[in-house]
Amino acid sequence: MVKETILKKYENRAVFWRTAEIQNQCTILCNQLSTTNYLKEPISEVLNTELSQLSNIYDGRVMVINEEYHIVKDTFGIEAGKTIISPDVIACFSGIGTSHYDGESRYIEITTPIVEKINGKNHVKGVVLVSVSTDIIHETLNELSGKANLLFAMMMLIVAVGGTFLANLMVKPLEEISHTIDDIAEGYDSDNLHVDAYTETKRISEAFNKMRNRMQVLDDSRQEFVSNVSHELKTPLTSMKVLADSLLAQEDVPAELYKEFLGDIAEEIERENNIINDLLSLVKMDRTSSDLNVKSENINELIERNLKRLRPIAALRNIELVYESFRPVMAEVDEVKLSLAISNLVENAIKYNKENGWVHVSLNADHKYFYVKVADSGVGIPQEALDHIFERFYRVDKSHSKEISGTGLGLAIARNAIITHRGAIKVHSEEGEGTTFTVRVPLNYIS
Ligand code: ADP
């Protein structure tokens, strides 16, 4: 298509220049014909030679026509003496030369008037008609067309080879990424991707590595959780088995020993029960927040209900449990889950306290959130443990925690409950001084 357009342009230009050249020659010739008496007596040697030269140079035919449309000179010597009445010749007698190109038959026909000035007026007394062949232009065109075809073929080859090369270059990193994804999908461990062939693959690699690392973290924490759960569930069972076995191994065991061992077994059953209950709460909490049963609740009443339940436990160790509310608060919360969080915090504040200590619970709110603060005068949490206390099964001092029962799940449950309410939980603690947990929950539930 492009090739045809270019060739057509060349042809038009070549025809235009050839026409202009011949028209020039004809104008000079017509001036000479006009000044001599050639139209009456076409015998001038000089002019005949010029006419033949014109005919030879342009590989064409020149005819000189007089006012009676008689051909007075034909360089081919065929039509001399005959009459010619063609539209071009008639048009030319009106004083304006014509030219037309016939691409099919490959010739240009040009007419030029032979003008004489009579009384200052132009009078056309004859016409020079020139037909020249454009074979030479077409030969050049054919040659150019052949070269263009060759060039086109070469370009196609370069595009095909270059295209394949580029495609391979671009597909290779993607193949590498795809292989690594397949490896991971099939469960094989694979290294980080290092594909940064071009910006896009670099971005894909980075996003992929991020996702892979996240998956790794999730997988690790899942494995750790499963091994922690099985360990925690097995410990009370092992103790029970040891206690039962030692009773069975002895004969005539005194009734007091039976009682004591059975008491220990009952304690272990209680521990196992607590762990299972906590695990179930955690699993329930882990589901999506759409499981939340959100209702508008009076938070003051909710806290007071929980504290009422815990007061007897605090009283056992003479711990003062004080509640302070700065304003009435209504908020959209899941009563069961928020209660679980608050009672876990207050229970801990009592558990990890000293005899005759205190626990202060306060409630405040602004236009967006309500805040619950649980402060105690207890043993405090070492600085290095603060980052871990919300992890499942984490207990600060393992030896110390033997005396104080617990599963290490309470704070994980509390944190989950607060997070599902789109809230936040913070802790501040000084060892030996006490601990303060602050909970912030939006007044209006954000789904
Ligand atoms: P646990 O069942 O052991 O109480 P938690 O998840 O509730 O498990 O708490 C994790 C650990 O954080 C506890 O073992 C305890 O060492 C520490 N802890 C939690 N609350 C307090 C507190 N108010 N004062 C001191 N230590 C605390």
Image (cartoon, helix red, strand yellow):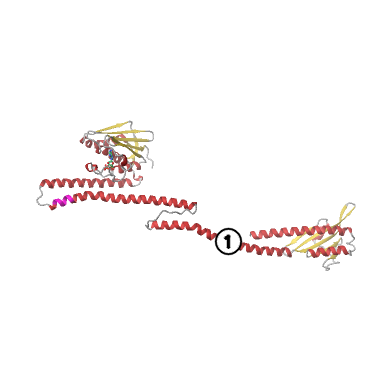
Q: Position of residue 377 (x, y in %)?
A: 27, 34
Q: The disc labelled 1 sits on which kind of residue?
A: Ile
Lateral position of residue 74 relative to residue 139, left or right: right
Q: Does the magenta segment cover residue 243?
A: yes
With respect to residue 170, does 339 lie above or below? above
Q: Nearer the viewer, residue 212 or 191?
A: 191
Determine which residue is flagged by label 1.
158
| Residue most extreme to the bottom | 78
Q: Is residue 242 left or right of residue 340?
A: left
Q: Quadrant of residue 124?
A: bottom right
Q: Position of residue 384 (x, y in %)?
A: 32, 41
Q: Is residue 267 above or below residue 320?
A: below
Q: Quadrant of residue 324?
A: top left
Q: Quadrant of the N terminus?
A: bottom right
Give me the residue at 82% from left, 57% from top. 27
- Ligand 1 shown in quarter: top left
Measured as percent of width and height from the top left, residue 333 is found at: 34, 39
The structure residue drawn at horizontal position 27% and vertical position 49%, both measured from the top left corner, is: 229
Q: Is residue 425 magenta?
A: no
Which portion, as a residue range, is magenta?
Answer: 242-247
